[in-house]
Amino acid sequence: MELKDQVVLVTGASRGLGAATAKAFGEAGAKVIVNYFQNSDKAQQVVNEIGSDRAIALRADVRNPDDLQLLVEQANHHFGQPITTIVNNALIDFSFNGDDRKQLNAIEWQDYHKQLEGSVGATLNTLQAAREGMTQLQFGRIINIGTNLVQNPVVPYHDYNTSKAALLGMTRSMAKELGPDGITVNMVSGGLLLKTDASAATPDAVFDIIKANTPIGRVVTPEEVADVVVFFASPSSRAVTGQNLVVDGGLVMD
């Protein structure tokens, strides 16, 4: 299915990588659901940039299955067709600051559970809510957002890194089940991005280190990762599923 014929749900799309991804799909001609949880004003700004004729902002807590079911119903009614593509991007209450991260003597299972619920749990909710429509179409594109810290945990954010490692396992498992229905499931894993709300707490010295050690000589932007997400929804990726593509300028070579 061409991008212009797709209806794309981007979770956590009011800011950062989510906003860049929503706009990239909008530029490609897709219809876009800008999901948000708290910041309706920023979500509406993203809609305005895409165009209100092709985008809508819908609130949902991705951790809540009922919220996702309602969002899917609203989107189907608004666009007159099922959701074809999901980008599981939402990040639950996390700041990338290695100095303040919880280490082994302080971290608790609740910290792990929060991140697992926000990545694996949220992805389960979106897939269950939208699968019926994709199965009817015999077409679907699922793109999960991961991290290069799974391959190289240079900063051991124990809870976050573990949740994304689990999401990679889920990506591959779901690719196996959903493939016969024409649904592909892939992951795009960026590094620290220049610069988002989540990375705002990261000291400038860390960005300098990444720049010095990255083959392309700079820190990757949200827009550059978003372009790869769009690729996984495009016809060019139709034979690719169960894969994890690291997009960090070559810092991690997997």
Image (cartoon, helix red, strand yellow):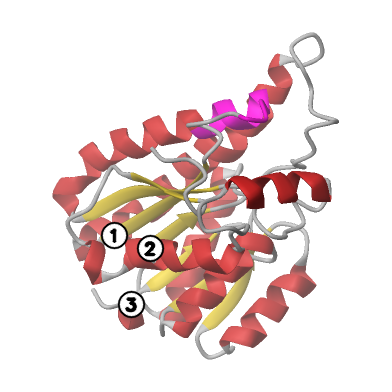
Q: Is residue 86 left or right of residue 136?
A: right
Nearer to us in this view, 76 or 106? 106
Residue 142, compared with residue 8, is above or below; it is above
Which residue is located at x 34 percent, y 61 percent? 232
Residue 216, compared with residue 104, is above or below; it is below
Asked which secondary structure carries label 3, the reply is helix
The magenta region covers 154-164
Look at mark 2 in the image and give the residue it sits on.
85
* Crowd tier of the residue under label 2, counting other residues whose Cα lies within 10 Å: few below 14, some 14–19, many 20 or above: many
Q: Are marks 2 and 1 in contact (CB under 8 Å)?
A: yes
Q: x, y percentage for residue 247?
A: 47, 53
Residue 152, compared with residue 11, is above or below; it is above
Asked which secondary structure carries label 2, the reply is strand
Look at discs 2 and 3 and give the one toward the viewer: 3
Q: x, y percentage for residue 26?
A: 49, 81
* Crowd tier of the residue under label 1, counting other residues whose Cα lies within 10 Å: few below 14, some 14–19, many 20 or above: many
Look at discs 3 and 1 and give the one toward the viewer: 3
Q: x, y percentage for residue 8?
A: 44, 69
Asked which secondary structure carries label 1, the reply is strand
* Kind of residue at disc 1: Gly
Q: x, y percentage for residue 101?
A: 79, 28
Look at mark 1 in the image and give the residue it sits on.
140
